[in-house]
Amino acid sequence: MGERVSPAPSSVLGLPADLTAALWLAAVPMLAACWLPWVLLRPNRLAAGEALHLPALDIVVGLVLALAVPLAGRFLPRAVPLLASLALGVGAWWLGSRTGAALSGQAEFARASASSGLWLWLLGAGISVYAARLVGRWMGGAGLLLAWLWLPAVLVMALAGHFASWSVVAEYTVQHNRFLQELGRHLYLILVALGLATLIGAPLAVWASRSVRVSGVVLGLAGGVQTVPSLALLGLLIAPLSALANAVPALRSLGISGIGLAPALTAMTLYALLPVLRNGVVSLRGVLPGVLDAARGMGMTDNQRFWRVQLPLALPVWLSGIRQAAVMLVGVASVAQLIGAGGLGYFIFSGLQSGAADLILLGALPAALLAIVLDTGLRGLETFLGQRLGRA
């Protein structure tokens, strides 16, 4: 559900206290970031680096911008969304410009990574943009659109190659074929596991919603699986699946073995079952008895009541469980690389083994973005269904 902020009276000049506090909270890391190194210049991806700070003029601009956002919240609230977007856009601009300046005259294998100052600035600017969205809703009008102004600016910079000198982009340029392959495998793991969990969990949820005893057993087993760490579950599946493949050679010809896709999909499906089951049971039981009685009074059969009344009303809440499962699977799929299933975890664990932070980010950043995209898309579908079906 989206944040609900009461509209502002036209006579009010300052923001509510909680929004003002959020803007000042965002300013703290941005102010600290101005004094920290922004770029780490290294002769190659593994060597120790030299920390580089912002030039004096950029520090002054950063200090002014960091203070301008909360001060605008006090004296000129309508400028907050624009200033917050500007802060995030400037951080992105400095990422490209400072890494490019650091690599000027360096060898081909040199790397310019984002350092603590940049990450801290982006954290503060991200918080201020989030607060600016609330300010935009509070004010109404174009404020909400201005809070998203940073997004097209960053996209234009990315398409123009402004971030080409950043070490993560440099690693992507070197390994873009492997990156696309592992990204495709990551999506495959998520979608297949989510589909299997939905196919298994949906009928179980319907059955469990009609019996307290069945729901106790089913939810208890699914919850028990969640208590097992993902890495341990993947390890526990190696022995039985290897034995099964040895006992039935036809399964081995289908690609089932103790390592690879089979244990990864099995573990991910088991992990995704609990949110699908739990939300299914809760949503189906949450339909008001009076609504079902009215449907029965209209002469509907049990099947008609389920498909035409109970399921449509339960669907938005049930979809929330599928959304939670999808976001969770993004993380579990990264661990599946440890048993040879591939995915973005390939870059994360390769970076951990070699001490290359850029490789870790090459896997971790797309995984985080993928989780955000899945969450946003499915949340939008929930809202749409809720509005269409009268639940939101």
Image: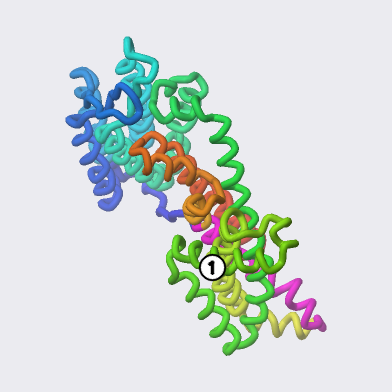
Residue for point 68% across, 55% down = 255
Residue 169 picture quarter: top left
Q: Which residue is drawn at 37% across and 43% down?
A: 352
Residue 126's place in the image compared with 41, above or below, is below
The residue drawn where x is 48% and y is 46% is 345
Q: Which amino acid does label 1 sit on?
A: Pro
The residue beneath circle 1 is 275
Secondary structure at badge 1 equals helix
The residue nearer to you, when weighing 111 against 260, is: 260
Q: Is residue 75 left or right of residue 251?
A: left
- Can residue 89 be seen at all in this image of the molecule? yes
At 48% from the left and 76% from the top, the residue drawn is 224
Q: Is residue 227 above or below residue 252?
A: below
Q: Position of residue 283 (x, y in %)?
A: 59, 73
Image position, residue 277 (x, y; %): 58, 72
Please tell me whether the stretch drawn in magenta is mainly helix, strand or loop. Answer: helix
Side (left or right) of 324 relative to 98: right
Q: Is residue 315 one of those drawn in magenta? A: yes
